[in-house]
Amino acid sequence: MSQFSQTQRVRAVDLARFKAEGRKIIALTAYHAHTASILDPYCDFVLVGDSLGMVMHGMESTLPVTLDMMIVQGQAVMRGTRRALVVVDMPFGSYEASKEQAFHSAVRVLKETGAGAIKMEGGSRFAETVAFLTGRGVPVMSHIGLTPQSVNTMGGFRVQGKDAEGEHRLLEDAVSLSEAGAFAIVMEGIVEPVARRIATEPKVTAPTIGIGASAACDGQILVLEDMLGLSDRMPKFVKQFGSLRSQIEEAVTAYVEEVRAGRFPADEHTYRGSSN
Ligand code: KIV
């Protein structure tokens, strides 16, 4: 370890300890240095999610997001954090072709951002890739259930685990990814009984992180802009803990009024001469 590192960050392996201690794992997404710095003291991990394509860039899905975009925002979030584990999403097309492709993309992310882990969507069919990466020093967080990168093959953003076949497949996904070495598994949009079954399955030793997958999970994550009330489209599983959209509108309206009325900038915002 560098003699200059002053703060010990949460590491991927620490999440298993939090689960063993029965302490809920807390996570939110961030794409920017300033929001990441606000979350840093409170979150065990901050996810630089590929949801940034939709949330920051107004894209219709996460599919157009590139590895370069993830790396730029990963660097920003690393600059804004000192203690939380930073996990960077692998975007669509950067890991599916082969385990070697996944390794090269993941190494770019870890080297160029300094993040502590990557996240990859997909179930059992990616277990071999997860084992390949973890065996070569890349901590992998898996993501199952409603996986937005599969929107075209799923036929939309659909809640998962509604029938016996879906339940069986999700359980198999979680067991195989956990056995392959995933240090945590994000479970998105999964009905409560199935999420509970997976979260309490002894063969699933990896901590489960829920987003629309009930309180049975070992931890929870939400997209920051959703829980702050900034996003305009909100899934059922989001609770709005803030109302930033209306606060921003209020502030912008006040600014417009004051500029129009000539009240802003006032004296205290004005450089009068060489003394100030
Ligand atoms: O991209 C993202 O923000 C995510 C979370 C929704 C888990 O994957």
Image: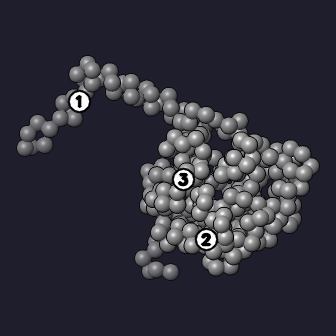
- Where residue 31 appears, as percent x and y from the top left, is 50, 52
Q: Which residue is mark 3?
A: 65
In the structure shown, which secondary structural element does the residue marked by tag 2 occupy? Answer: helix
Q: Residue furthest left?
A: 274
> In the rendered image, is residue 234 in sight?
yes
Residue type of the residue flagged with mark 3: Val
Q: CA distance from mark 1 to mark 3?
A: 40 Å
Q: How is the image coloured?
A: one colour
Is residue 186 placed above or below 60 in the rendered structure?
Answer: below
Three-letter code for the amino acid on which mark 1 is drawn: Pro
Under circle 3, the secondary element is loop
Q: Earlier in the sequence, mark 2 or mark 1?
A: 2
**Which image quadrant for residue 118?**
bottom right
Point 82% across, 51% down: residue: 195
Above or below: residue 256 compared with residue 54: above
Which quadrant of the structure image shows residue 177?
bottom right
In the picture of the structure, the residue carrying the numbered disc 1 is 265
- Which of discs 1 and 3 lies nearer the camera? The answer is 3
Dot 1: element: loop
Q: Relative to 147, is 69 on the left or the right? A: left
First in residue order: circle 3 vs circle 2: 3
The C terminus: image quadrant: top left
For label 3, count other residues whose C-alpha is less than 10 Å away and answer few (under 14), some (14-19) or many (20+): many
Query: Crowding at label 2, few (<14), some or many (≥20) Cα neighbours within 10 Å?
Result: some
The amino acid beneath tag 2 is: Gln
How far is mark 2 from mark 1, CA to CA? 54 Å
